[in-house]
Image (tube, helix red, strand yellow):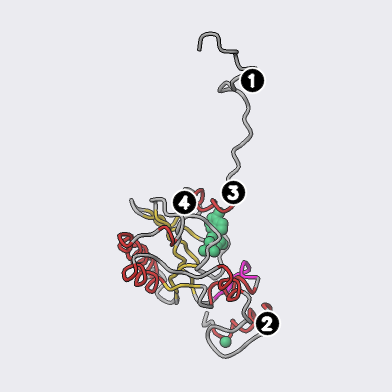
Amino acid sequence: MAGATPSKRAAPDSNTLQPAKKTHWSQGLLASMNDPNLVVESDDRIVIIKDKYPKARYHFLVIPKLNFPNLKSLKREQSELLHYMEDQSRLLATKYPQVEFRYGYHAIPSMSQLHLHMISQDFDSPCLKTKRHWNSFNTRYFLDSADVIRCLEERGMVVTMTPIAGEKLLDQPLKCHKCVYSPQNMPKLKQHLYKHINN
Ligand code: AMP
Ligand code: ZN
């Protein structure tokens, strides 16, 4: 602009070393969707990756390619996508005929970008360490895919729970998912779980 005082700050040229753009850890799934070491299936709509910190022997995440941050961002028209995500995960499960899986969503996820957990029910993994880990997959905090889809179709939105209700579930006493055993701590639960695994 004529007469304007030139800016004292030099514009960065393309060779200027810029600090690496740091993304928040909660965005990590976006990078993992392109990580060939993690991707197991991919098509034009979804990517299936191995969970980087698996909480069971088989733990996959089914992630849509379109940007949906979480369950709350879905509208009724996305129920077809959720069906597709579950169908594709069940298709992957046919490769593991001996393995029992559950398919669902954390009510209050920590990672951004919608992801369906497909997790084997052995819960035999060194990454499964805390009561919160356990309860996130073994209380009402884990929403079955079928229930999420039904809610979306009936109400036009996915109703989850308040953060306070979520915290209560994560803090519940430990309870085995296969029997009445209520262990005092995670090491006892993990030891007990081997009784239910038929290798
Ligand atoms: P949540 O958001 O609670 O539904 O769970 C996020 C899941 O993503 C957890 O099971 C983590 O182990 C997994 N996870 C965290 N970071 C990454 C990553 N960068 N790549 C793949 N999986 C991840
Ligand atoms: Zn048990």
Seen in the image, is 134 located left or right of residue 157? right
Ligand 2, what quadrant? bottom right
Earlier-in-chain disc, 2 versus 1: 1
Q: Label for residue 9?
A: 1
Q: Position of residue 111 (x, y in %)?
A: 53, 57
The residue beneath circle 3 is 24
The residue beneath circle 4 is 33
The residue beneath circle 2 is 188
* Amino acid type of the residue tagged 2 in the rendering: Lys
Q: Position of residue 9 (x, y in %)?
A: 64, 20
Which dot, 4 or 3, sits closer to the camera? 3
Earlier-in-chain disc, 2 versus 3: 3
CA neighbours of label 1 inside 10 A, class few (<14), some (14 to 19), many (20+) = few
Task: For mark 2, give the secondary structure.
Answer: helix
Seen in the image, is 33 located left or right of residue 193? left
Earlier-in-chain disc, 4 versus 2: 4
